[in-house]
Image (cartoon, helix red, strand yellow):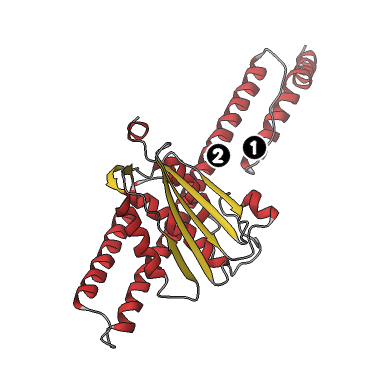
């Protein structure tokens, strides 16, 4: 009788327990090794089958949580890179104003009025950096950056563009020419976001330009779109760059550890243009060099909706 019980237990273990227990043991070892790329399958309706199914559901939940964590880390990485990238050009602009004052004040070529205007512009840029730092501290991704649109004169945005161009022309060997349109109208826009896009486009163009960059603006009253274009006289976009330049963290030379370029500037511009109801397009100019064109929807009703 005892021998029969032992034989029955052995047969039951071999036929009903050994396989699912081996599956569960292997699955636990894989999960412990942080390997979730497998599937737990045991086709049975008994308790061991339900236990294996529960393990499979747990594995799927772990995969989902891991993917969510990866996305969160990527968003934070992108945000940190955007923050570091976007600080560069405003700081360069401030350096341009500082160099301008340091160069011409000792020579007596700066009037009291010009000095006061320059200091006010520097103060405005510092306040903008403070607001930007506070905003980036509160948001969890670029897509959460708030859009602060309001009624304003197009001339006001053009003046801010001119200020950025003036400051950048005080430093470096690249000359930036601003072809300002003669359009006079009221638009509904976020001037800080537009200037931020311009600064990113200029930062990218300065890296590749040989001697000069041209900035152009235009306003299409029919579509209520503000258009900014930045063209450089560099080598232009290669075929591979044309396909990948708008992707985050794209670099021309991926293995260049010394390259301080984040490879995120154009990606940020595209995200911000989309937030403002517009687009970002890149191309090679017929006159040579690369050209990036950013558009911003300035329709009040579309922004309010």
Pointers 2 and 1 in contact (C-beta within 8 Å): yes
Q: SS of the residue at dot 2?
A: helix
Q: Residue at x 30, y 79 (%)?
A: 101
The answer to whether 32 is drawn above or below residue 180 in the figure is: above
Query: Which quadrant holds residue 40?
Result: top right
Q: Determine whether, in the image, residue 94 is placed left or right of residue 208.
A: left
Residue 252 lies, in percent from the top left, at 64, 60
Q: Decide which of 139, 267 is in the foreground and name it.
A: 267
Q: Is residue 49 visible?
A: yes
Q: Nearer the viewer, residue 131 or 141?
A: 131
Apparent side of residue 91 relative to residue 201 in the rendered image (left or right): left
Query: Which residue was labeled with disc 2?
Result: 66
Q: Position of residue 169 (x, y in %)?
A: 42, 72
Q: Which residue is mark 1?
A: 36
Q: Please, is residue 272 above or below residue 129 in the view?
A: above
Q: Is residue 87 above or below residue 119?
A: above
User: Which residue is nearer to you in this view: 96 or 224?
Assistant: 224
Q: CA distance from mark 2 to mark 1?
A: 10 Å
Question: Which mark is in front, 2 or 1?
Answer: 2
Q: Estimate the x, y position of residue 155 in percent, counting from the top left.
A: 31, 53
């Amino acid at each position: 009788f005892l021998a029969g019980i032992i034989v029955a237990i052995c047969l039951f273990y071999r036929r009903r327990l050994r396989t699912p227990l081996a599956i569960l043991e292997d699955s636990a070892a894989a999960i412990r090794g942080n390997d979730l790329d497998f599937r737990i399958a045991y086709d049975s309706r008994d308790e061991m089958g339900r236990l294996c199914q529960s393990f499979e559901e747990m594995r799927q939940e772990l995969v989902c949580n891991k993917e969510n964590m990866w996305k969160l880390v990527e968003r934070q990485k992108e945000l940190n890179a955007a923050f570091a990238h976007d600080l560069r050009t405003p700081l360069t602009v401030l350096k341009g104003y500082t160099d301008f004052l340091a160069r011409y004040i000792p020579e007596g070529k700066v009037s009291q009025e010009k000095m006061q205007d320059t200091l006010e512009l520097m103060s405005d840029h510092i306040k903008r950096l403070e607001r930007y730092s506070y905003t980036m501290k509160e948001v969890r991704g670029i897509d959460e950056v708030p859009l602060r649109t309001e009624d304003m004169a197009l001339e006001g945005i053009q003046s801010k563009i001119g200020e950025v161009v003036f400051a950048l022309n005080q430093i470096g060997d690249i000359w930036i020419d601003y072809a300002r349109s003669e359009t006079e109208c009221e638009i509904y826009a976020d001037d800080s976001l537009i200037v931020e896009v311009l600064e990113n486009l200029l930062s990218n163009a300065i890296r590749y330009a040989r001697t000069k960059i041209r900035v152009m603006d235009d306003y299409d009253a029919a579509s209520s779109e503000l258009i900014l274009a930045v063209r450089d006289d560099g080598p232009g976009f290669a075929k591979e760059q044309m396909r990948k330049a708008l992707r985050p963290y794209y670099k021309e030379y991926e293995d260049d550890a010394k390259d301080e370029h984040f490879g995120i500037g154009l990606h940020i511009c595209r995200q911000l243009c989309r937030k403002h109801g517009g687009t970002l397009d890149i191309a090679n100019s017929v006159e040579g060099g690369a050209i990036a064109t950013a558009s911003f929807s300035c329709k009040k009703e579309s922004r309010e909706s």
